[in-house]
Image (cartoon, rainbow, N blue to C red):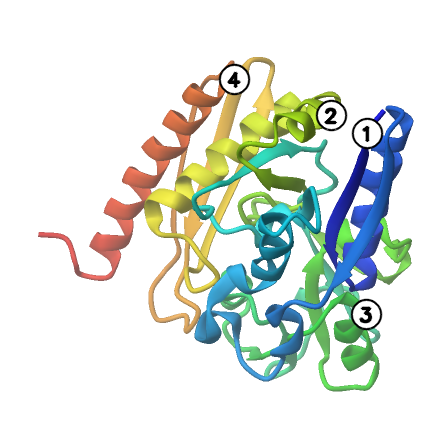
Amino acid sequence: MQHFTIATRESRLALWQAEHVKALLEQQGHQVTLLGMTTQGDQILDRALSKVGGKGLFVKELELALEEGRADLAVHSLKDVPMELPPGFTLACVLEREDPRDAWVSSRYAALTDLPQGAVVGTSSLRRMALVRALRPDLKIEALRGNLDTRLRKLDDGLYDGIVLAAAGLKRLGLESRIRAIFEPHQMLPAAGQGALGIEVRTGRQDVIAALAPLMHQLTWLAVSAERAVSRVMGGSCSMPLAAHAVFFGETLKINATWGDPEGNTPLVQTQALASVSDTASAVALGEKVAVALQAGVDKATGKSA
């Protein structure tokens, strides 16, 4: 039995995620406490993440707690974890994935297709902006920052006709009744790692890595490894309107990737590939193959190809 401290953001969803990992570790016989923290990403709500430092704003303070020994592990929504971790840190574990899809939430309209021309949709994700514009170029998209509860409150205050959120977060907090419709991946391809929880540790902490080993979900790990490889090669961050989603069919992993223009001036670029995948190396290789094809399509669509 060991004692571990989990560094976590203090939003309701982040605390749910940390409590979930805490319970799983306690089932293994460990003692676990939480260290709640407020990150820069939580504090800066008046600007898009792509303008102020990207997804890393949600993890820097947690990584500092790991580095200083105040915490042993940090729990993240994997889609918020940068594709390249700082030296000395590693993604030690990925739990079984929740629903990776996006959800339509609205008090007035049952689906995106029901919105009148010029209606206002809230999201600050460049990926969602691009995909919503591809589905409904006649709509107005306005910035929506804040944690899940804040976003729902802004919707309820009438600032938006509808908003797009990750289905996983709503389900984890028992808010599934707020979902009016689910976007299937062929309509709105999820972000790399969406719906999965990732656990970050210091590279040398073999004791923590060993304790987390029973929590690892191998199929999720391989799928998100392929997805994150697409983003890594493409330079993916919150400033990149990029989607990547992988699904197993038996031993075959199929991955779809999409790049879009948030302003809607360029058509979506989409590609897919599949391969037999049984280890991290083959999953990463598949993701890199898709990224090369996608980048070629983006270069052609934007006039950058030779």
User: What separation in Å lies between label 1 and label 2 (alpha carbons)?
Assistant: 9 Å
Q: Residue furthest left?
A: 306
Three-letter residue code for mark 2? Ala
Crowding around mark 4 (Cα neighbors within 10 Å: few <14, some 14 to 19, many 20+) is few
Q: Is residue 253 shown to the viewer in this render?
A: yes
Q: Quadrant of residue 268?
A: bottom left
| Residue at (51% x, 23% y) in the render | 253
SS category of the residue bearing label 1 = loop
- Residue marked by disc 1: 2
Seen in the picture, residue 137 relative to 291 is either above or below; the reply is below
Real-space Cα separation, disc 3 to disc 2, in angstroms:
32 Å
Q: Residues within 10 Å of mark 2 (few under 14, many from 20)?
A: some
Instruction: Check disc 3 and report the residue beneath it.
Output: 149
Observer-nearest of 10 and 140: 10
Pointer 4 residue: 252
Q: Indicate which label's residue lies in the foreground, 3 or 4.
A: 3
Label 1 environment density (alpha carbons within 10 Å; few <14, some 14–19, many ≥20):
few
Residue nearest the viewer, comparing 297 with 193: 193
**CA gap, disc 3 to disc 4?**
38 Å
Vertical comparison of 286 with 190: above or below: above
- Reading the chain from its start, which is encountered first: label 4 or label 1? 1
Residue 29 placement: quadrant: top right
What separation in Å lies between label 1 and label 3 (alpha carbons)? 34 Å
Mark 3 neighbour class, 10 Å CA radius: few under 14, some 14 to 19, many 20 or more: some
